[in-house]
């Protein structure tokens, strides 16, 4: 269930990545155009705010994909001697998705809050069941 919740986050991230820079709303379109138009130097590179936004989207996409892979691999290790390592890794993922839910609450909107919180809860239940 946790991997499915992260898969939904990945799907939402994908949709957002494809649609963010072509809004219908005129005010949002103006903001996006300004994000693309102005580039500033920072730490040896000159990029626009849109470039940073796009890059962060790809990083988050990659993170969710990696977590799905790690959960898939870890799920097969629960019954083996590597159980302790699998539980430790899954515990760290559960904690980070709990933190993500707080960040999403502060800066974003309800769906990623719910999915991140569900991921954390599902992983917590899986950890508890494995002991």
Image (cartoon, grey):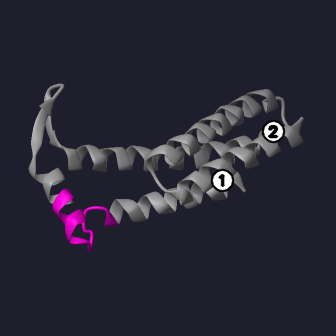
Are there few (<14), some (14-19), or many (20+) residues within 10 Å of tag 1?
some
Q: Which residue bears the numbered disc 2?
A: 127
Where is residue 8 shown, x and y percent of the image? 57, 61
- 129 lies left or right of 12: right
Q: Earlier in the sequence, mark 1 or mark 2?
A: 1
Q: Quadrant of the C terminus?
A: top right
Q: Which residues are magenta?
A: 19-31
- 5 lies left or right of 17: right
- 100 lies left or right of 124: left
Q: Is residue 22 magenta?
A: yes
Q: Is residue 35 magenta?
A: no
Identify the element where label 1 is drawn: helix
Q: Which mark is residue 104?
A: none
Q: What is the spatial separation of the Cα atoms under label 1 and label 2, in whole angstroms?
A: 14 Å
Instruction: Please identify the quarter of the rendering in which residue 90 is found.
Output: top right
Q: Nearer the viewer, residue 85 or 48?
A: 48
Where is residue 105 shown, x and y percent of the image? 53, 47
At 73% from the left edge and 46% from the top edge, which residue is drawn? Answer: 121
Where is residue 11 shown, x and y percent of the image? 50, 62
Q: Quadrant of the N terminus?
A: bottom right
At 71% from the left edge and 33% from the top edge, which residue is drawn? Answer: 91
Are there few (<14), some (14-19), or many (20+) residues within 10 Å of tag 2?
some
Instruction: Please identify the quarter of the rendering in which residue 84 is found.
Output: top right
At 65% from the left edge and 59% from the top edge, which residue is drawn? Answer: 4
Instruction: Please identify the quarter of the rendering in which residue 94 is found.
Output: top right
Q: Which residue bears the numbered disc 1?
A: 3
């Amino acid at each position: 269930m946790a991997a499915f919740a992260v898969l939904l986050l990945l799907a939402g991230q994908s949709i957002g990545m494809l649609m963010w820079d072509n809004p219908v709303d005129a005010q949002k379109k103006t903001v996006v155009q300004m994000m693309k138009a102005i580039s500033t130097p920072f730490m040896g590179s000159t990029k626009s705010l849109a470039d940073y936004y796009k890059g962060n989207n790809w990083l988050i996409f990659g993170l969710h994909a990696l977590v799905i892979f790690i959960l898939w691999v870890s799920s097969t290790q629960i019954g083996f001697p590597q159980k302790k390592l699998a539980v430790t890794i899954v515990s760290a993922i559960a904690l980070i998705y709990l933190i993500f839910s707080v960040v999403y609450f502060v800066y974003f909107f309800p769906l990623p809050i719910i999915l991140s919180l569900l991921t954390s809860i599902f992983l917590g239940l899986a950890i508890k069941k494995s002991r």
